[in-house]
Image (cartoon, rainbow, N blue to C red):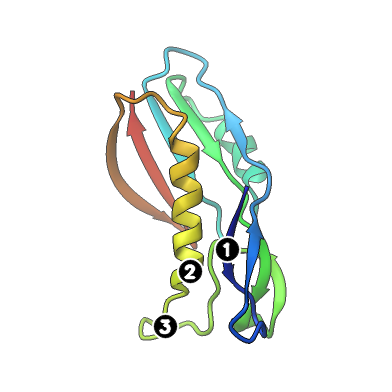
Amino acid sequence: MSFTGPSIGSGGRREALEFGRTHVVRPKGRHQATVVWLHGLGDNGSSWSQLLETLPLPNIKWICPTAPTRPITLFGGFPTTTWFDMGELSEDAPDDVEGLEAAAGHVANLLSIEPADTNKEPEASASKGKVKVIED
């Protein structure tokens, strides 16, 4: 799946962001909740899915997508998996709105295949990623 977003040094051109593989940990019991787990900077969905499989939460479906690999301004353009670009570590730093919108759109697409009668729950931070919870 891809979305259009900025690229470092692109001179305003936008290029498609290719999201990596999405790993799913299916519930071992009755499916009562779904969590979309977004990994942190430089990580991937696979590493988290392996950990989440070990948790004693048999009624939760875990969806662990992998962010696109893209240049990070903060790292001098070094490419790594990331949900959005970071120019500096500051609360006042400008947000990568295009990257954030692409990540939100990707999560929305992943959730669109979940049952229609689900309720959304609050978010919680997990490194640079976010955790989304919905219930069946």
Quarter of the figure that contains the C terminus: top left
Q: For the residue labelled by badge 1, is the local secondary structure a helix, a strand or a loop?
A: strand
Mark 1 vs 3, N-terminal side: 1
113 or 75: nearer the viewer = 113
Choose mark 2 or mark 3, whichever is in front.
Answer: 2
Q: Residue at x 60, y 63 (%)?
A: 82
Q: Percent from the top left, x then y, of residue 125?
A: 39, 56
Against 109, residue 83 (above or below) is: below
Question: In this image, 100 relative to 12: left or right?
Answer: left
Q: For the residue labelled by badge 2, is the local secondary structure a helix, a strand or a loop?
A: helix
Task: Compute the Cα span from label 2 to label 3.
Answer: 12 Å
Q: For the residue labelled by badge 3, is the local secondary structure a helix, a strand or a loop?
A: loop
Dot 2: few (<14), some (14–19), or many (≥20) neighbours within 10 Å? some
51 or 75: nearer the viewer = 75
Residue, disc 1: 4
Mark 1 vs 2, N-terminal side: 1
Contact (Cβ within 8 Å) of mark 1 with mark 3: no
Contact (Cβ within 8 Å) of mark 1 with mark 2: yes
Question: In this image, 10 relative to 27: left or right?
Answer: right
Say which amino acid is labelled 1.
Thr
Residue, disc 2: 98
Say which amino acid is labelled 3.
Pro
117 or 52: nearer the viewer = 117
Residue, disc 3: 94
Question: In this image, 8 relative to 107: left or right?
Answer: right
Q: Residue at x 36, y 81 (%)?
A: 91
